[in-house]
Image (cartoon, helix red, strand yellow):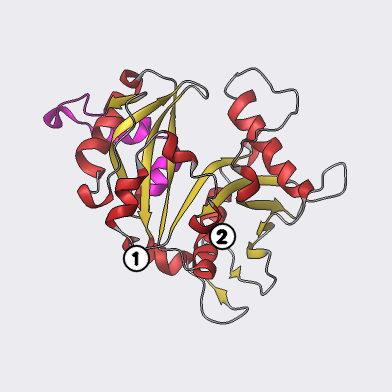
Amino acid sequence: MAPAALRYAADDHILARQGPFEVRLAASEAEVRAAQQLRHEVFRTEAQLPPLASGIEADRFDPFCDHIIVCDRSAKTPEGRPPVVGTYRALRSEAAVSGFYSDAEFDLAQLFGRHPHLRFCEVGRSCVAQPYRALGVLDALWRGLFVYAARHGIDVYFGVASFPGTDPRAHAMALSWLCHHEVGGPAWHAEARSGGAVPMDLVAPQALDRRLAMRQMPALVRGYLQIGAHIGRTAFVDPVFGTIDVLVVAPLADAPRPWRRRFEPRPGPALTSRV
C-alpha cells in the first residue's frame, strides 16, 4: 500500500505531514528537550550505558543546530503534547561556529577543500522511538531533510553513522562491503583521524557476501546507500558511545531519481505529492 499523501505546509516550522506524523523544526526549548530525551533513551538506555542524571543526551553542538523532529499527532504525552517519536539534528556551515561533530573523527578539511562551491550541512543524532521503527518515521525524517535542504540551498549532507560495539571484526562483512563497493572515490573521501582509525577492508573482495553484509548493516546505513551516499574508506572507533563510526557523504544531486521524486518538495507554498 502506498503511503498517504504528503503535504508541504507554508508554516516555517513545519516541513511535512503524512498520516499522523508531522515533521517540523523544534520551535521551543520543550521540543528540543523532548528530542534530547529520546536520544538519551536510544543512545544510552537501549545501549545499556550509564544513564545521565539530566535524562537528556546533549553536547556542545546542540545550541547551534536545528532539531528536526517527528511528532505523532494521534497520541498525547502526559503534558498533552504530541510525543516526539523521531529526531535528527542539522548543523549548517554558517552556524558551525564551534566546528562540526564529525571533524573530531574525520578530517573534513580535505573534503570541503575539494568542493568550495557546494553548501555542506552536517546531520546526526538520528533516532526513532522503539515502538515506531516499523512505521515509516525514518522515511518521514528524510522527507523533512529534503525540504530543509531546499529551503537552505544545501547541496551535500554529511555525518557519521554508527555500528554497535567497538570490535570491527563483529561487522567484518558489512564494513568490507562498504569499503569495496560503496566508497565514493577521492572526490568524497575524508580520512579517519589517527586516534581511533580502523581499517574496513577485513574480508577479501572475492569472499564478500552481499546478503550477509546488508543484514549486518544498521537500517540507517542501508537508507543512506539507497539515496546514493558515499562511505569513507576508513572507520573510527568511538569509545564514548561504544560504536564504530563511518563517514557518510550524501550529495543530494546524486540521489536516484525515484528517491528525488519521492522526497523533494514541489514548487509552491502548499502542494501535495503522492509517493
Label 1 Cα neighbours within 10 Å, binned few <14 / some 14-19 / many ≥20:
few
Helix, strand or loop at mark 2: helix
Residue named by callout 2: 144
Residue named by callout 1: 117
Residue 15 percent across, percent down from the top left: 62, 64
Q: Is residue 212 visible?
A: no
Looking at the rendered structure, the number of numbered marks drawn on it comes to: 2
Pick whichever of labels 2 and 1 is earlier in the sequence: 1
Identity, as a three-letter code, of the amino acid under mark 2: Gly
Residue 78's label in the rendered image is: none
Q: Is residue 137 visible?
A: yes
Work out whether residue 120 or residue 129 is closer to the camera in this orientation and state it: 120
Magenta stretch in the rendered image: 200-224
> For residue 252: magenta?
no
Residue 162, above or below 3: above
Helix, strand or loop at mark 1: loop
Identity, as a three-letter code, of the amino acid under mark 1: His
Which residue is depicted at the point 79% across and 47% down?
A: 30
Q: CA distance from mark 2 to mark 1?
A: 24 Å
Residue 8, above or below 227: below
Which residue is depicted at the point 62% across and 25% down?
A: 44
Depth check, mark 2 against mark 1: the one in front is 1
Which residue is depicted at the point 61% across and 38% down?
A: 60
